[in-house]
Image (spheres, helix red, strand yellow):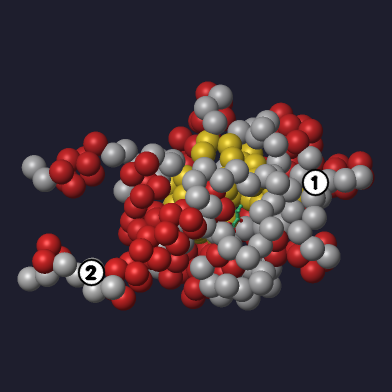
Amino acid sequence: MSAGLQRKIIMKKVTVPEVLAMKGDGRKIAVLTAYDFTMARILDMAGVPVILVGDSAGMVSGGYETTLPVTMEEMLYHTRAVSRGVERALVIGDMPFASYQVSTEHARGNAARFVKEGYAAAIKLEGGKRSFDAIKAIVDMDIPVMGHIGLTPQSVHRFGGYRVQGRPEERASEILEDARAVQEAGAFAMVLEGIPASLAAEITAAVRIPTIGIGAGPHCDGQVLVVNDMLGLTTGMKRPRFVKEYSDLKRTITRAVKKYIKEVEEKVFPDEDHSY
Ligand code: KIV
């Protein structure tokens, strides 16, 4: 039997019920974003249980200034590429701006495209109370939904920048209400982004579904980071305080590329070992 086939048989897919059960069992959930086949394959083989094809793809891979210009077609391309690279992880496709806010019918149609054309097992969308109908409509067609509240990047213009949400106190209770609405609408999990750790702890204790934090402190049921940030690949922007760099790939890549340029220019590469 080939190693690939053996791996496929041994690998058990991570499912939505399993992610829900992780909260009950007190097992923390590690989530990372991915946008292409190669990165998805590496993350999957390293054992990350949940991969989010975030609309951060627009900024990280596409160079947009915000996530707002990202289109359905772009998200489907990234989601398909990630799905092809994954054998075990749960793949969640992120619905881009204006793909779920226009009407519930539009939201259902676009969510279905993530499953049919992107091979995603679930979708994520932003907003609490205001997204209740969209979440419910999508869940009603058996597509699991991950909510996303707090500092929702698609609301950047309303917030006036990427600012921590949930301060002062009234805004904290609005976010708690958003969390309850996301759960009531039938979501299986929710991202809590850019809120005080104490508020994230309160929400995590108040809801039955897992909370996945990003810039929301240590009390969430899981954590998510943009993979380029945690690998030290991000360029040209100030690193937010919540990002921990687990590697310095920017430096590693720069060194390798400089060496390659030098070897080509000095006629060291290709040598006999790398020629036919
Ligand atoms: O788009 C994204 O990558 C996200 C996560 C960081 C939560 O929404």
Indicate whether 92 appears above or below 170.
Answer: below
Depicted 125 relative to depicted 65: above or below: above
| Number of disc labels | 2
Tags 1 and 2 touching, CB below 8 Å: no
Looking at the picture, how far across and down is residue 78, in whole percent?
Answer: 45, 66
Q: Quadrant of ligand 1?
A: bottom right
Name the mark on residue 269: 2
Position of residue 190 in the picture relative to residue 233 (left or right): right
Q: 189 or 84: nearer the eye?
A: 84
Closer-to-camera residue (188/201):
201
Q: Mark 1 points at which residue?
A: 175
Q: Distance between the residues labelled 1 and 2?
A: 57 Å
Residue that appears at 42% across and 59% down: 255
Residue at x-position 33% and y-position 44%:
45
Quadrant location, the C terminus = bottom left
The mark lying in front, picked from 1 and 2, is 2
> Helix or strand or loop: what does disc 2 sit on?
loop
Residue at 8% x, 42% y is 1
Which kind of residue does numbered mark 1 sit on? Ile
> Residue 23: x and y, percent?
56, 30
Can see residue 227?
no
